[in-house]
Amino acid sequence: MLTARFTAPAVPKTLVHRPELLRRLTAGVRGPLTLINGPAGSGKTVLTAHWAAAGGRAPRAPLWLTVEPDDAPGVFWAYVLEALHRGGVELPAAVGRPTRAEGVTQSFLVRLAAGLAESAQPVVLVLDQFDTAQPPAMTEGLDFVLRHAAGGLRIVLTSRTDSLLPLHRYRAAGEIAEIRHADLRFTHADAEALLGEHRLDISQAGIRLLMRRTEGWAAGVRLCALAMQRSPDPEAFVRQFAADRTTIADYLLREVLDAQPPDTQDLLLRVSVTDRVHPDLADALTGRDDAARTLAGLARDNAFLEQVDASAWYRLHPLFAEVLRAHLRQRHPGLEQQLHGRAARWLAGTGRLTEAVVQGAAAGDWPFAAGQLVDDLAIGRLFTGLEAEQLNRAFAPLPAEAPGAAPALVGAAARLVVQDLPGYEDAAWRADSRLNPGSGAAARFSRSFLGVLAGRATGDPAATERAAADAERVLGELPPQRVAAHPELRALLLAALGAVRLGAGRPDAAENALTAAVEACAGPGTDPGTQYPLYDALGSLALAELMRGRLRQAAEHARASLAVAEQAALPPERRSGAGHLVLAGVAVEHDDLPAARSHLDLATAIAAAGPRPDAVAAVLAAVIGARIAAYEGDGEAALAVLTRLRPAATATAAATPAPVSAWAVDELAVAESAAHLARGDAAAALRVLDAAPCGRPEHLLARARALLAAGRTGPAARELAGLPAAEGLAAPARLAACLLRARLAAAEGDTEEARRRQAEAADLARPEGLRLPPLAESGPRARRALREAPRPPARRGRPSDGPPPVMAPPVVESPVVESLSARETEVLRQAARMLSTEEIAAELYVSANTVKTHLKSIYRKLGVTRRSDAVHRAQDLGLL
């Protein structure tokens, strides 16, 4: 008898405590059979030894027996009896011992079962590595004794394969506890604990990467931890380690591959070239017809191959696959590329496009791989969808000299994905030189499709419109069912077209294309390929509505865009920040500067991590930032924001991808003029506007405002007279015009007209909840005239057509250093009603933190430190 077989292995010093599995083991031995099943290195024996070392939490400590592969039935039972004897289990002498190594008699099994049934306490016996020796006679005998011991015997089996015991009977009777491979996999917390035991300080991202590489395989995590201890940079090791050059390779080759017969080894090596394998695909790779049986057996035996979701497909553990591929290259040089080619054609024949393309690229068969993508109209999948990253990674090694138009088109697309415009131009030139009138419609469409996306990147409206018209024409030549299978194509085309029109300052035309893009994404079912263009189109649509002053629609589209990004879990590099940018612009119009600042900061952070922003987003971000600074009274900060995006520099600045449009130039000029007015420099405001003459209503309004601030009422009146009819103006522009006319009337001494215009402004502001611009924008003369004009009577109630306007504070001469903003006045008005901070927040539809921010500003401006003092001070000054 070998004494070592009766001793549980020592528990490692760097042990990961797994209380839930230990609890399940303790609960399991209350029944007759506990099965711990998993592949090599999954931690079966370590877990069981840890549990046994603690006494198994049972009246009698569990007994241990390691089963050897060459144990014959008689030898096995002799060892079982010796284990019972060493554990202090007293059996009747009549039980006896096996007389033959090859087997035992039924009489012996009956006597043993009867003796165990009479035991005062149940015996718990661990049979470690039971799968290494399972002749039918042994498992049948064990089943007989276990069922007839009347609860006197409890068995714990650890195995790599399912035992030949009739497990279905035990399951039906509820007499088995099972701990399987999925239970044994390390969790993130387990891996973190193990690395801590090895005194390794690895980041959370590094641990997640380690878990992704090992898929929680306990031995893999432990071997990596040991290797990291020897590495000068453990964090870098996680990112760079190659399984085939570590002890992991030796472990897997010896414990898993070498344990298989030669034909099975050959199959494993050949199928390792694919991420997942079907029996028919495996037969195509091996040239045999036994894959179905072999794959099922490997999965059943936990040979690092598992069935995918109860389908006919299987997948190898990624580390095992990596080791197998390296071994394949060593054992059969040159075969790997051939196998990729075979797999590509089999997958293409079964309609699995993405897998076929990836395999074709791995084989270096670029005409086949690119041709599949182009001919199937799937080139849009390089830009959107779940396979985008995988496809772009597959085509990363695509050489420029690869023959044919399809590789050139795909190469151009790959360059466009990473916004490498010079690289795109080179590849597009090669594609053009290889295309001809006889080229297929799919290839010609792909070229036009890329032209639209490139036009957006370069900001060329004319080229974009031409390419879009070409793409639409060629689409009509293609089979409708093939076009319908790729809804992302129209969505991407229309979203790009709308964005380009928006950049050209044509929000009305942009809305048509963007609305159609959103509709293209709303077909039956949810296609992952349309999630990004839907997000993109909604963000651009929100920007268009903001440009037109339709704040409600802008906010709705912005929130919808953000919701799509969250639902689709778009990575940071695919997000533009347009949604938060629009919400910042809306918050400015509503005089909620804390919210505006918060959204603008979010938009800036997202844009920094994502692709280069479109010109519209870049310009609006600068304009909104400047407006916030100006409304906070910091004209210098407002100018500093705009200086970074002056029209003269915009054409080459990294902040925008292309030369700016006339709209952008004027938008920046208007914003800069407002910043100068905030500094009290009306002359500078006029110089900025006169340097970039424009007929936009916003430009005329800005000139009128600057002229009024300079005291030039006549020219200001002429500018206002040149505005389009009210129906042709956006709501903010109509409101601004009305206020300027009120200021003009006040400056000319027509107090009745000034009062009427102020009341009209309140009505105009109400539907969109617009902010009435502060007097800082008007200049000293207009401010003085308005102070002398009678205020319009307060309106009672709330009309049905929208929320009340955000009114400017009452204009009074007082020792207040700085005027209260409209929202601060409203907060103070609610505070006077003795409402709590939370109640004020609910009343004004803002957060409690926003209310607190406003209160702090009110205290500073009124020179008080308490809410009650602020109310009394405001009442004394006539602010309430």
Image (cartoon, rainbow, N blue to C red):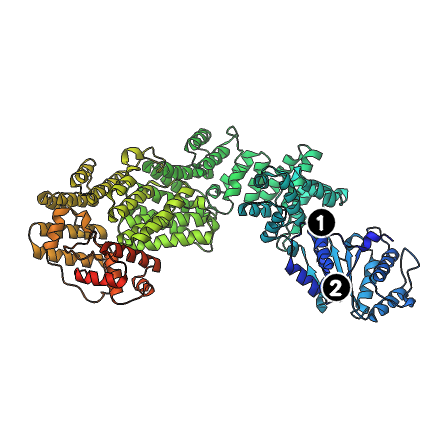
**Residue 832's spot in the image, x, y percent?**
24, 65
Q: In this view, does 550 lie to the left or right of 533?
A: left
State the image quarter where residue 134 is shown.
Answer: bottom right
**Residue 332's spot in the image, x, y percent?**
70, 34
- The residue singled out by tag 2 in the image is 33
Above or below, 583 against 376 in this view is below
Return the disc, 2 or 1, that comes first in the chain's sequence.
2
Would you say residue 768 is visible in this rendering?
A: no
- Name of the residue lying farthest toward the right: 99
**Residue 73's spot in the image, x, y percent?**
86, 57
Q: What's under tag 1, amino acid-wise?
A: Ala
- Mark 1 residue element: loop
Which residue is at 17% across, 62% downward?
876
The residue lying toward the viewer, choosing from 358 and 801, is: 801
**Residue 449's spot in the image, x, y percent?**
42, 39
Q: Is residue 641 left or right of residue 162?
A: left
Which residue is at 62% across, 41% downward?
228
Q: What's under tag 2, amino acid-wise?
A: Leu
- Quadrant for the C terminus, please: bottom left
Which disc number belongs to residue 40? 1
Which residue is at 69% across, 37% downward?
327
